[in-house]
Image (tube, rainbow, N blue to C red):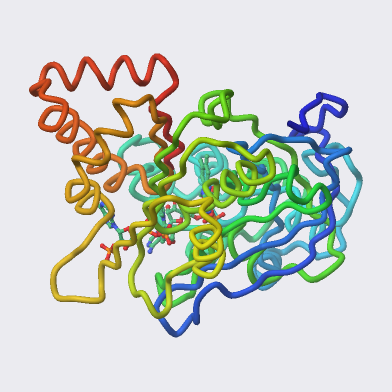
């Protein structure tokens, strides 16, 4: 494994990697825009192991930044000290060092007092009302709905809050390619208050970065989401949607290390024709006997839903054989719905196929978790 702590890159001291490309994994007209992102990132500088995530500090959408400045009495080139301590223009600070796509309750309180607006102050002072107000609003909404006749550029920079990094499961192994890191990212975009809203980091990497651009990043080492140390151990990977990302890295790593353990992948998304991410790679692994089972659940190819947990239930007998034989069970992707349902399917499989009943299955899963045999990276 390529793992050393040579460099201590962090949010305060990010590594400056170079953006390579953003490739469409599906046609955006299919209802989803999911991208395969490549970033030049030498293992000698930023080592990680598969299962880790890349933390990226994004830049804000330039149109949003321009509109924010236009909604204030400030000038784009007003000199300010950014949250990182650097002296720069207001535009540079709002673009790269601040959070502007969200309003914090602290910022709301400050702004309401600054413009001395009684109505806004009443909202800001009431926890529930403030929560409701800031939900779905960005700094531009605030400035346009409650304009300020006076506003100091430095105050604005200080009060909006600093830029927040986003995590992305790494979709490639440095044991396979030591020079480049790959990610699988779903573009976040929605309409609200007659304006298109863009997820800050997903669209920064997916739509706005160009080859050679500087990407500020560092590694989040996943302590509880790793391949088994014993390469003979079987693994079952459940990764619908962008949850597929770390399992692409797992497969690259298992093949590079000539692991003898068997590999079973569950993937799912909307339509087989559009959203079967990395299909050719899975087929190559299958053909080479490196992937023993591949089960795919396309939820919108028929009138009823087929999800990964339905396939786990269908394969319960074989799944139990693998688990009983010591296989590790991994889940990545949506935390709110999918991970809960897959957890229930795992319990059911152990209860019924393992003959352990409900309570016995709960105990068994608890022990699997303790032993690091049930690992989840869900968000
Ligand atoms: C460990 C970990 C691993 C991850 N791995 C991946 C990965 O591999 N691939 C991936 O794509 N993501 C991954 N994520 C999620 C990722 O970190 C970001 O949260 C995601 O990309 C959105 O960030 P953003 O900056 O684009 O959006 P933000 O600017 O953060 O906006 C997202 C917010 O916008 C709001 N919002 C979104 N849609 C709507 C809507 N329709 N209506 C109203 N409000 C809405 C919600 O408040 C939401 O929280 C991972 C997260 C974690 C914690
Ligand atoms: N917590 C989060 O913030 C979070 C987590 C994951 C994804 N997302 C956002 O959702 C969007 C798409 O994400 P994604 O591409 O990764 O795909 P996804 O939304 O996770 O969907 C992948 C597949 O999972 C299916 N699914 C839905 N409910 C499920 C359940 N209960 N059990 C099992 N499978 C289920 C979906 O089917 P149907 O859609 O047909 O029901 C789809 O086929 C992105 O904008 C992403 O940022 C947000």
- Name the quarter where the N terminus is drawn: top right
Q: What's the residue at 37%, 43% (across, down)?
A: 131
Q: Quadrant of residue 213?
A: bottom right
Residue 322: x and y in percent read 33, 34
Q: Is residue 143 visible?
A: no
Q: Is residue 363 visible?
A: yes
Q: What's the residue at 82%, 49% (across, down)?
A: 41
Judged from this view, the residue extending furthest toward the bottom is: 29
Q: Is residue 261 left or right of residue 317?
A: right
Looking at the rendered structure, the number of numbered marks drawn on it comes to 0
Q: Is residue 11 left or right of residue 143?
A: right
Q: Quadrant of residue 101?
A: bottom right
| Foreground residue among 325 and 65 | 325
- Name the quarter where the C terminus is drawn: top left
Q: What's the residue at 62%, 36% (across, down)?
A: 52
Residue 321: x and y in percent read 27, 33
| Foreground residue among 342 and 14 | 342
| Foreground residue among 190 and 129 | 190
| Foreground residue among 89 and 333 | 333
Residue 217: x and y in percent read 75, 44
Q: Is residue 300 left or right of residue 119?
A: left
Q: What's the residue at 41%, 24% (across, down)?
A: 373
Residue 361: x and y in percent read 17, 22
């Amino acid at each position: 494994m390529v793992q050393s702590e040579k460099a201590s890159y962090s949010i305060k001291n990010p590594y400056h990697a170079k953006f390579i490309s953003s490739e469409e994994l599906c046609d955006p007209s299919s209802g989803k825009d999911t991208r395969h992102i490549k970033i030049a990132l030498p293992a000698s500088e930023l080592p990680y192991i598969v299962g880790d995530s890349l933390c990226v500090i994004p830049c804000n959408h330039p149109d949003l930044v321009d509109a924010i400045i236009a909604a204030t009495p400030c000038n784009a080139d007003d000199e300010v000290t950014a949250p990182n301590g650097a002296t720069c223009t207001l535009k540079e600070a709002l673009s790269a060092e601040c959070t502007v796509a969200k309003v914090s309750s602290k910022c709301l309180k400050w702004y309401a007092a600054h413009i001395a607006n009684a109505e806004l102050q009443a909202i800001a002072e009431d926890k529930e009302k403030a929560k409701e107000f800031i939900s779905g609003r960005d700094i531009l909404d605030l400035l346009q709905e409650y304009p300020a006749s006076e506003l100091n550029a430095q105050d604005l920079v200080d009060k909006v809050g600093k830029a927040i990094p986003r995590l992305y499961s790494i979709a490639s192994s440095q044991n396979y390619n030591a020079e480049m890191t790959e990610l699988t990212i779903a573009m976040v975009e929605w309409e609200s208050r007659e304006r298109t809203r863009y997820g800050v980091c997903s669209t920064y990497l997916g739509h706005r970065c160009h080859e050679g651009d500087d990407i500020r990043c560092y590694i989040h080492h996943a302590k509880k989401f790793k391949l088994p140390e014993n390469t003979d151990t079987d693994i079952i990977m459940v990764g619908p949607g962008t949850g597929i990302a770390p399992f692409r890295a797992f497969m690259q790593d298992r093949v590079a290390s000539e692991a003898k353990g068997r590999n079973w992948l569950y993937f799912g998304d909307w339509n087989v024709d559009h959203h079967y991410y990395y299909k050719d790679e899975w087929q190559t692994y299958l053909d080479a006997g490196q992937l023993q089972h591949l089960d795919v659940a396309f939820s919108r190819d028929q009138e009823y839903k087929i999800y990964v947990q339905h396939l786990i239930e269908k394969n319960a007998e074989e799944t139990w054989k693998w688990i009983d034989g010591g296989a590790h069970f991994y889940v990545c992707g949506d935390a709110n719905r999918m991970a809960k349902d897959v957890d229930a399917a795992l319990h059911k499989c152990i209860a019924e196929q393992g003959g352990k009943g409900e309570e016995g299955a709960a105990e068994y899963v608890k022990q699997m978790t303790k032993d690091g045999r049930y690992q989840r990276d869900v968000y």
